[in-house]
Amino acid sequence: MPCRSMWLLNTATYQLVQEPDPSQVDYAILSHVWHRDEQSFQDIQTIHALARESFETVPEDDDPKLLTFIRSRLSAKIRHCCDYARARGLQYAWIDTCCIDKTSSAELSEAINSMFDWYSHAMVCYVFMADVPHTENPELPGSAFRRSAWFTRGWTLQELIVPWGNVFLSMDWCMVGTKASLGTVIEDVTGIERDVLLRARPLHSVSVARRISWATSRKTTRVEDEAYCLMGLFGVRLPALYGEGRQAFVRLQEEIMKRIPDQSLLAWGYILPLKSLKTALPTLERVPIDQLRSSKGAYLFAHRPADFHKHSAAFSPLPLGSFARMLGLPSLDPPLYMPTSHGMRTTFPVATIRFPSAGRDGSGSGTDPDTGGVDVLLAVLSCCDVDGRLPALILAEQDASWKHIASGFDAEHGFLYTMDGFADEPLDGPLDTGCLRRGGTLTRAEWIRRARAADETHDQLRPRIALLDSEVLYSELFRSTLRVRDVCIPYQSLHIGPDSQSEMLTRRFPKRTGEGFSGPCDVILPAWTLEHLKLLNVDVDVEMRGGGMVPLPVRRSGDWDNKQGHHTLQLYDGPTAILVTMYMCPTAAARPFPPERPLHAWVSWHNASLYSGGGVDSENSGVPPRRCSGESEHVSTWTDGKKHFPNPLEDSSSVTLRFISLWDRDELSGVGLQDYLGYNLYKPPFYALEITYERSVPRNSTSADEYSG
C-alpha cells in the first residue's frame, strides 16, 4: 500500500516539494526539541517568494544569488540539517516544524496519522541534540547525552524506535554516535530494550502496558499529543481533535482494545499485593459514589501515560488456554467489549473475597457485616508478571449486579507506596516513604497530605489492582467463588463543566495550581534535601514535630498583604552560616484576593558566631529584603525553578535552590472537590525547596561578607 503523500525539503534548493509516494524516495528526517523560533511551512514559502521578488527575471532554482538570499533567512537548524543530509548524498529531508501545513486541520491530522509510516520509510533519522557537546563521552554517568531534553519529549519516542537507523548529532552538528553504537546507553536512559531499538525484536511482541510505560516520563506541549504520539506504536489511527484534552488518551485506549488482545492495557494504577488469603487481609473501606465520580481511578481506562507505573510494564499477555489452566477453568471464550452509556461491558473471571473494614467505632477490623466487612470483587486479567502473578481489577458493585466501579475502596489506615506502584501496609516506626516527610502509621488525613506533597492525587493512591500470588490462585476460598461474570465499568471520566465552582476558581487563581511561585506561601524541605545536608554534617535550623518538618511560613501571621513578608532559613556548616532568605516582592502589585506577590529567594554567607545559639529570630534574621529590580529576580522566571548561588569567598562552594510546586492543575479531578477548594482557597500555596550544597576546600572563616543572587 503506498505511503501517504508528504512535503519534503530539497536539501540543495531548500524548496518544499510534495511527494505522492514517499516510500519511493530516499530522504532523511530530523528529530529535535522544538524552540520558540522554529520556522513554519508558511515561513519557508514566504522566504522563497521574497527571494524571487528580488530578481528582475525568473531565476533558476540553483542560482547562487538566490540560494545565498534563501540561506541568509533560513534558521540555522534547517540549514545545517540540509547541509548534513546533502553531504551524505540525500536529496530530501523532512523536518516536522516546516514540512507540515499546520494551518490546515485536515493536513495536520493526516500528517499525525502518517508519521509512523514516514519514519519507517526514511533512510536515516538525524537526532539533533542542542544541549549535548561532541567533546564529552556519552557513556559516562551523568553525561549531557544521558540528561538531554530530547529523551523527555513525547514525539521523540517514535522517532527513536521506528527508524531503521538513528544518527545522534551534537550541538555543533558533529556525530556523537548511532542507535547501534549507543544502544546500551539509550536502553539505560529510556528503559527500552536494545533488541527493540535495533528491531531484533518485533514491536508487536512487547506488551501494551510496557509500550505505554515508555512514555510515562515524557512531556508534550499539547495534552492531546500524549495520545497522538503513541498511535504508531500500536498501529492505530485517530483523527486529531485538538481541544479534547485527555479524552484523546481515552480514545487511544479504546482503539487499542479493539485491535490488540492484551489486557495489560487495564493493569494501570497502584497495586495491592495479595500473597495469601489465610493471613490478615488489608483493611478496606467503601468509597461513596459521589467521591468516585471525581476520581480517575474509578474508570476502566487510564487518565494519562504516567498512570502506568513501573510494575505495569512487567505484565505480559497470556494465551487464553494458559490463562484458563492457571485459574482451574476448563476453557475461556475471548472477551467481547461492548461500549454502552454505562461504560464498557465485558466478561471477566471474577472471585468474591470479603475484606475487613473499620468497625462502627472506627477501630474494628472484623469480617462480620455488623463490623463493616466488605465484599470485594477481583476481576482477573489475562496477563502475568515475570513471577507468574496475575493482576486483578478491584471492583465494587453499584446499583445492579452487572455494573461495577474500579478502585471503589480506600484504605482506612493508609498504605505506603513504592516507585514501582506497589501498596504496602504501614509498618511500625519511622519510614522513608519517598514523600516529603517521614513518619510511621498514617492517618487518613496524613495519607492525603502526603499524596499532595508527593505530587500525587488522592485517587491515584487507591489500590486499583490486586496482584494475586500463586497461593491465592490455588486456594479453595478463591476458586470456590470464581465465576465468569458480565461486568460493566465506566470507561471515561465525567467532565466538570465550565460553570463549576472548581473551574472558576482555577481560572481566577491560576497560581494556586502550580503555574507560578508567589507569596504568602508555606515552604518545606523534601526528605532527600534533609538527608543530603545531614550527610554533609550541615545543621538546618528547622522545627521537627511528630516525625515531620514544620513548614516555613513566608508571610506575617494574619497579614495577607504584607509587602515585606519573609522567612530566613539558616544552615550551619562549621564556622559558616548560610542564610536562605525567601520573601514576597516588595514592589509588584498584589493580585486580587487572596493578595499574592511574586516570590524572591537569595543566599548569603556569614560568620556563624553571629547567628549561633538561637539568638536570632528566623523571621527577621539576615539582611532585609531588597527592592525588586525586575521580573528576572522572581523565582517564577528561574529555569525549572532552579538557580545557582556561588560563594564569593570560595570558588568551590555553592548553593543551588530549586522550588517545586506541589499542585498540578491537570490533577484537579483526582482530589476530592471539597478538599481541593478548602485547601487552596483558604490556605497559601505549598512549595518544596530542594537545596544542593557543594563544597570541596577548607573555608576562610574570617570574612562575614555576603553575596546575593
Image: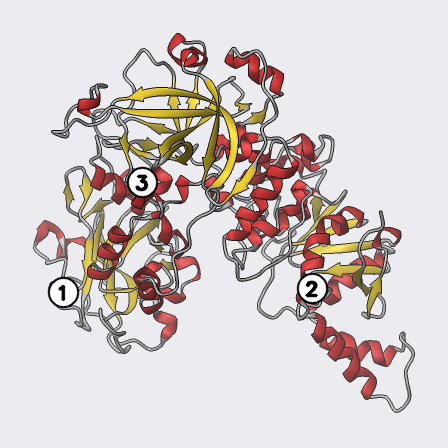
Q: Residue at x 83, y 67 (%)?
A: 17
Name the residue type under label 3: Cys
Q: Is residue 152 visible?
A: no
The answer to whether the residues at label 2 and label 1 have Cβ atoms under 8 Å apart is no
Pick whichever of labels 1 and 3 is earlier in the sequence.
Answer: 3
Image location (x, y in percent) of residue 536 = 30, 41
What is the quadrant of residue 476 in the picture? top left
Q: Is residue 296 above or below residue 268?
A: below
Circle 1 residue: 556
* Mark 1 residue element: loop
Residue 277 visible in the displayed image: yes
Q: Nearer the viewer, residue 27 or 622?
A: 27
Q: Which residue is mark 3?
A: 435
Q: Residues within 10 Å of mark 3 (few under 14, many from 20)?
A: many
Left-right relation of 496 to 35? left
The percent coordinates of residue 391 (x first, y second) are 47, 25
Q: Which residue is labeled 2 in the image?
A: 106
Whole-number angstrom distance, CA of label 2 to CA of label 1: 55 Å
- Residue 422 lies in quadrant: top left
Which amino acid, by three-letter code, is at mark 2?
A: Ala
Contact, CB < 8 Å: mark 3 with mark 2?
Answer: no
Name the spot of residue 425 as percent of width and height, x first. 29, 26
Quarter of the rendering occupied by the C terminus = bottom left
